[in-house]
Amino acid sequence: MRPLRARMACAVENADLRQRLDKALTHTIAAREDRVRERADWEALRDAAAARRRHALERLPDLLEEFERNATASGARVHYAQTAGEATDLVAGFTGRPAAPLVKSKSMVTEEIGLRIALAGAGIAVVETDLGEYVIQLANSTPSHIVAPVIHLSAGDIARVFRSELGLDIPEDNDPRTISLAARAHLRDAFLRAEVGMCGANFLTAAEGAVVVCTNEGNAGLCTSLPRRLIVVAGIEKVMPDLASLHECLVLLASSSTGQRQNCYLNILRGPRAGGEPDGPDSVDIVLLDNGRSALLGDDGLWESLACIRCGACLNACPVYGVTGGQAYGWVYPGPIGIVLSPFLGSPEGRAMADACTLCGACGDVCPVRIDLPACISHVRARGAPRLPGIPSAAAAAFSTSPFGLLAGLVRARSRRQGRVRLGPARAWSLGRELPPCSGVPFRRLWRDEGGDDE
Ligand code: SF4
């Protein structure tokens, strides 16, 4: 994989990509804003959801125990996986060698651990059944958005994939409805033949031992009710106290992700089918994945990012994501939340992703569960950014008489004369931007006047 900076630069040069992103994001942002306007209690919903998610994280060990107890009582088997490798081994073990491909609904956590690819390596075929994920699978590509995996593709691109990979007869007008119906007819056979189904979880509820899955296509309902065996893979942070505690999160998830009042389908799964029930699996295995989440929970500056409900609103609002799309980030979680999760959940980029942020604050403004994303990203940067040789820390620069200290004085002097900063290499950049004038008093003098010391 090329370096992050090169991938970003290449994406920025792609005018078609920018145009498609702009069209899709403009539509999604407007739809979300419609929902915000029509709910007088929007901010109260955010407060409540933020409090509920944080409260659940504070009680995480207890809630996981309660979830395990109640899920087991309803007939499911609950397993814990510390790493991606453990999770894929567990799933491969449950799956065995089914006669037909396993059908799977969209799940970010399975993308995170590369489950489909790992199972393919073990000789187990998987069919993605979410339309966007199916296109990604057929195109041998990667998702570009955590909610809309093919946000970077046009209807024509998708039609071409179906024609070339499946031989589907799709008319040249590339009508999205025709494309969807052709894909649906093709996938129907996979649903009917599958012996094993798989899904992720938007939430787990401890009191009911339930797995909650929100979708708009109905494919999760088929994946979880037609095959005789069901495997669920979920991050440990998904657990909430009970179904009643989901109310605000469900409203905010639908509104913030796609601008809907509610998702089209809400599946609440509890154990295998009971005697006499016509639908549902005979066995349910639930894999609860850590993969860095416990370490993240223990991080004072970043733990609240585990409250994320994966709505994607921060991606939509991010000006960097808006011109590069998600694939340039090189990891399954792009955009602001991806930057925050990257040091813990196994991003190949690690902390370097934090450089792909302008700290404009737009992500924090829209986050429905009030994660302070700009503060989290600053935290990732402060802890992780390798310091280039010869460049001192901000604190040292503030107090030094080194070239950095002198540069600060120079900027201040220019600012007094010009009213704004246009200096040296920053000149071209500053031509299109109005920066506030610098303070006339050096920071170190203010600091010392307040009684601070140079250490
Ligand atoms: S961090 Fe907030 S805005 Fe971003 S995906 Fe998560 S819940 Fe949505």
Image (tube, helix red, strand yellow):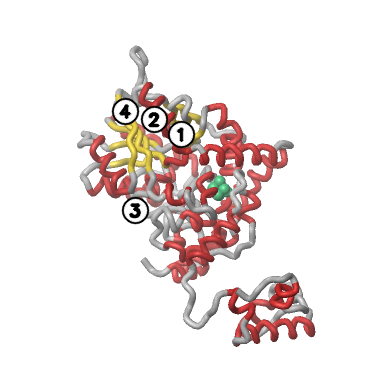
| Three-letter amino acid code of the residue under disc 4 | Pro
- Residue at (35% x, 12% y) in the render: 276
Q: Secondary structure at mark 2?
A: helix
Mark 3 crowdedness (10 Å alpha carbons): few <14, some 14-19, many ≥20:
few
| Residue 414 relative to residue 327: left or right | right
Of the residues shown, which amino acid type is indicated by label 1?
Asp
- Mark 1 or 4, closer to the camera: 1
Residue that appears at 52% across and 57% down? 335
Judged from the image, the secondary structure of the residue bearing numbered disc 3 is: loop
Residue 132, picture quadrant: top left
- Residue identified by numbered label 2: 68
- Cα distance, mark 2 to mark 3? 36 Å
Q: Which residue is mark 3?
A: 140
C-alpha gap between disc 2 and disc 4: 23 Å
Mark 2 or mark 1, which has the lower sequence index?
A: 1
Q: Position of residue 116 (x, y in %)?
A: 31, 46
Question: Front-most of 234 and 68?
Answer: 68
The foreground one among 393 and 16 is 393
Question: Which label belongs to residue 227?
Answer: 4
Looking at the picture, which amino acid does disc 2 mark? Glu
The kind of residue on which mark 3 rests is: Asn
Q: CA distance from mark 3 to mark 1?
A: 40 Å
- Sequence-wise, which precedes: disc 1 or disc 4? 1
Q: What label does residue 62 carry, if any?
A: 1
Marks 3,1: beta carbons within 8 A: no
Q: Please tell me whether mark 2 or mark 1 is closer to you in this view.
A: 1
Q: From the viewer's perspective, is the residue at label 2 or at label 3 nearer?
A: 2
**Quadrant containing the N terminus in the rendered view:** bottom left
Compute the Cα span from label 1 to label 4: 32 Å
Upstream in sequence: badge 2 or badge 4: 2
Visible residue check, residue 313 = no
Gap between marks 4 and 3, in whole Å?
25 Å
